[in-house]
Amino acid sequence: MFDGATMLGFSAVHYKPTAEIVHRVHAAGAVRPTHRRQGLGTKLMQHGLATAKALHALHHPTLELVVESIYGEHVHGAVALYRAAAMTATKSSRHMRHPLGTAAPHAPIPDGLRIEGYTAETDEEFRAVRNEAAQHTGGSPLSAEEWEVWAVNASFRPALSFLLRDVETGTAAGVLLVVSWEAETVATGVRDAYFRVIATRPAYQERGVAEALISHTLRAAQDQGYGRASLRVDADSSSKEFGVYESAGFVTQDTQVHYSIAL
């Protein structure tokens, strides 16, 4: 949405190339602070929902459509907008950051495992570990096409993505994958290493796999000139999971609420 050459706001909708039973479409948007409270958010919301319906009809017309969106709980205007659109809060997540200014606690590589950097040859192992860990906790697997769009896209940072492998069996035990957005770096002046995937195969849990991967990646990010690291975790995740991140030096920055509506 523009006023002459000035962008006043935007609406972005992302559909899933592959889906089963339910097609979940993610919608996002924002309005320039100087132009809020003028009904622009409502118009952009309506445009986003209409676009979601059009994409759904084009790609997955036989499935159920659910539109999802995420926003900070402190942004009251956005909360009111979602509620007015009949969207309901389904869960919340915490955005956590690590300043990288202080040395990350050292977590040793567990016995019998070795660390490897990402390569094109191990890409499928990264996806397999992520999917197995997600399904173990009730999540959904990502197809190869979805993985390429969501994880190993233009923002992916292979030099900051690592895998822990079982030396004896050759099995990938855990993975950590990082992305970083150049636009965010330009806007904030801070180069952020976002931990997109932190996953451990169920058979290797309780062995310090996640701790070792996080520790190694934090040090690598600092060595490569990043200004901070960040991640997002479900607010209702286990206290143990929070403990791992907090022990590594991550601090909650804000809480975001996930909204959805079935159309």
Image (spheres, rainbow, N blue to C red):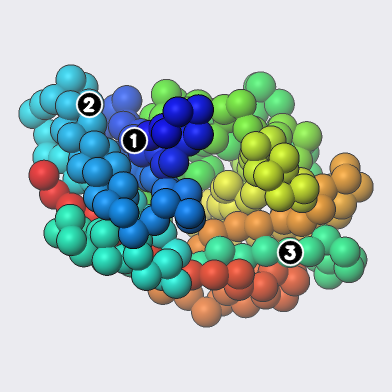
The residue at 13%/49% (across/down) is 262
Q: Residues within 10 Å of mark 3 (few under 14, many from 20)?
A: many
Report the side of 163 relative to 226 (left or right). left
Residue at the disc numbered 2: 55
Residue at the disc numbered 1: 13
Which label lies toward us, 3 or 1? 1
Q: Earlier in the sequence, mark 3 or mark 2?
A: 2
Residue 64 position by quadrant: top left
Q: What's the residue type where badge 2 is placed? A: Leu
Q: Is residue 90 above or below residue 161?
A: below
Label 3: element kind: strand
Disc assigned to residue 98: 3
- Disc 1 versus disc 2: distance between alpha carbons? 9 Å
Q: Position of residue 56 (x, y in %)?
A: 18, 29
Q: Position of residue 90 (x, y in %)?
A: 27, 64
Report the side of 140 relative to 175 (left or right). left
Q: Earlier in the sequence, mark 3 or mark 1?
A: 1
Q: Residues within 10 Å of mark 1 (few under 14, many from 20)?
A: some
Q: Residues within 10 Å of mark 2 (few under 14, many from 20)?
A: some
Q: Quadrant of the N terminus?
A: top left
